[in-house]
Amino acid sequence: MKKIISIVCLIFVLASYIYIYNKKENLSPYLLVTFVDTQLNNHYYKYNIKSKENDLLNKRPMTDYPTSIQTKNKKFLYYTSRENSKYTQLYELNLKTNKSRKLTSDFASVDYLRVDEKSEKIYMRVSLRGNHRNFTVATYDTKTDKIDIFNPEEEDLSIKSFDVNNSTGEVLAVVFSSKQDYENVDKANKNQTPLEVAPQVAPHYLKLINLSTNKSKTLCTLNKDVLDVSIYSNGNKALFTANDNHDLISYGQRKIYLLDIKTQRYNPIIKDSSNYMDISSPNFSIDGNGFYYIATNFNCEPISDTTGITIYPKVILYYDFSTKDSKEVWFKTNGNIRNFVVLR
């Protein structure tokens, strides 16, 4: 009897160890980094945070501002391009055969890709043709090739950026009035408005969008230039980047804020510094203990591309909520990071 109990205990211990090990492994995600070299070629790197190894998934000439995402099964890379089109569209690259196919053709532009692994849908920010000057969110179903567009009749409210909650499929989006934004810019240009009295940016709204019901809920209204968002999988907290200067002309300091979705309260976590500026693109880590973000690194030598443009390169950093410190995670010479995403 004691022998049986001992065996059962041993099995339990081993099972617990395997569970903890697998859970720990799941907390060691990959970053998908879109990097453009000085010869204007897109590089799509899959970076293993644990082993610190880069896997170059693909390289191709840059045709516009590149964005990309990879599915969890690792078979496909989805990216945006104007390879064979006047307009930027969504493409699928088979990583085994290295063959690509165009998935969309009717949009004026496609960018800002995310993936919902449960539904196997690619989420994208799109601009519709016709009278639309605004952007909305659409999904491409990888199983059926079906495309669904959120609120396609809307011609004013525009989505600047978004993130997808993989647990619920809901979208957290930064939304503003494109009409009001254009009016403010026109007013500033016509009146040659001085810096100190320049009009404010249009109010920005953080909205939760349910694409299946085609409905949205406003979480909060911000009189800030909000750039991007990230939502944690439990749906209780989010991150967003904002420029604290309200005017349209002068340059302001960027901050990354932590938002409590239930209370709708938010507080700044980090801000631009003398070493790292233009902070943006917060991405929650899988365990929620911190987040990754991009910043321009003024400690590096500036770089120039084939067009003669000279800039300081960007770096990906990780911020730890417990230590309140940031550390560099990913950097590469002879080019610049355009964007990245945590593969969940």
Image: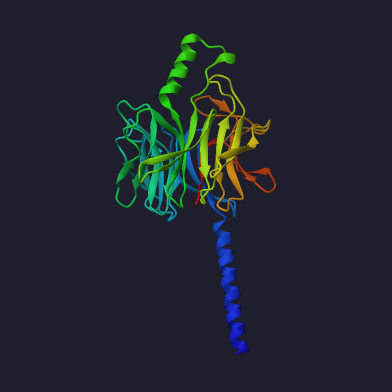
Residue closest to the eye, 199 or 294: 199
In this rendering, the answer to whether 30 lies above or below 105 is below
Q: Residue at x 59, y 74 (%)?
A: 14
Residue 333 image point, x, y percent: 59, 38
Quarter of the image with the N terminus is: bottom right
Q: Measured along the vertical axis of the image, is residue 307 above or below residue 139? A: above
The picture places residue 18, in percent across and down from the top left corner, at 57, 69
- Residue 89, placed above or below residue 15: above
Q: Please report the residue visible at 64 percent of the width from the left and 37 percent of the height from the top.
A: 270
Residue at left offset 66%, top offset 44%: 327
State how the image is colored: rainbow
Q: Is residue 327 in view from this perspective?
A: yes
| Rendering coords of residue 331 (x, y %) | 60, 41
125 on left or right of 325: left
> Which residue is at a point 46% across and 53% down the rendered structure image?
167
Residue furthest to the bottom: 1
- Residue 315 in sight in this render: no
Q: In this view, does 29 lie to the left or right of 138?
A: right
Task: Report the number of discs.
Answer: 0
The percent position of residue 54, horizontal first and vertical second, equals 54, 49
